[in-house]
Image (cartoon, helix red, strand yellow):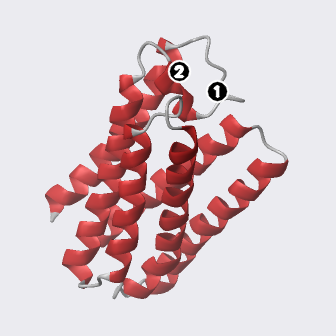
Amino acid sequence: MAYLRLITIGSAVAFLVGTISLHFLQPDYDPVNQLMSEFALGPYGIIMLFAFIALASSISTLAFVIRQRYGNITLPVVLLIGAACFAGAGILPIDMFNEAHIILVFCAFVMCGLGMYLLPGCLHSSSKVHDRMISWGLGGLLVFTVIVGQVMLPGGIAQRLEAAILLVWVVVFAWRTAR
């Protein structure tokens, strides 16, 4: 089970490395107003595909950890749907499949947000109150960021915050569920 934790965390780090490197490789890109998906439009766009696949890998591996450790099937299915949507968004780049790409990213975040809500009910830990506070707190922060991102924050900033919240959740619970 420890190897799954490493894959989950390593995949999250790979997503970060890929997207952060694109900020330096494509300096004309505006991270405040442009979505991360728009990195796929530049000369190093293939890195964005790998970033999406790494994110999908991180989430799906967490789903397998939860399934193995707790025997729950509902949450892993929800997370696997979210992971499949992220992978699909990477495969269908925003320039050629704009609507499908946007719908897949939206569905991925909805499924992961649902996963944040469902996770505490699946855990059998003695620290269930802490797990609930962490998971629901990050889930609430994700929802808040989505809402504020529609009204007040520039799109690029909002999306980066949402991705960061999701990655923190994945890494924290990869660590917590594998101990």
Q: Residue at position x 76%, y 37% from top?
A: 154
Q: Residue at position x 70%, y 55% from top?
A: 145
Looking at the rendering, which quadrant does residue 53 occupy? top left
Horizontal and vertical percent position of residue 113: 54, 67
Horizontal and vertical percent position of residue 29: 61, 18
Horizontal and vertical percent position of residue 150: 78, 50
**Observer able to see residue 154:** yes
Q: Is residue 6 left or right of residue 27?
A: left
Residue at the disc numbered 2: 23
Amino acid residing under circle 1: Pro
Residue at the disc numbered 1: 31
Tell me the element at label 1: loop
Q: Residue at position x 42%, y 83% from top?
A: 127
Q: Is residue 76 left or right of residue 96?
A: left
Asked if 124 appears above or below 154 in the picture, the reply is: below
**Observer able to see residue 173:** no
Amino acid residing under circle 2: His
Going from N to C along the chain, the mark reached first, 1 or 2, is 2
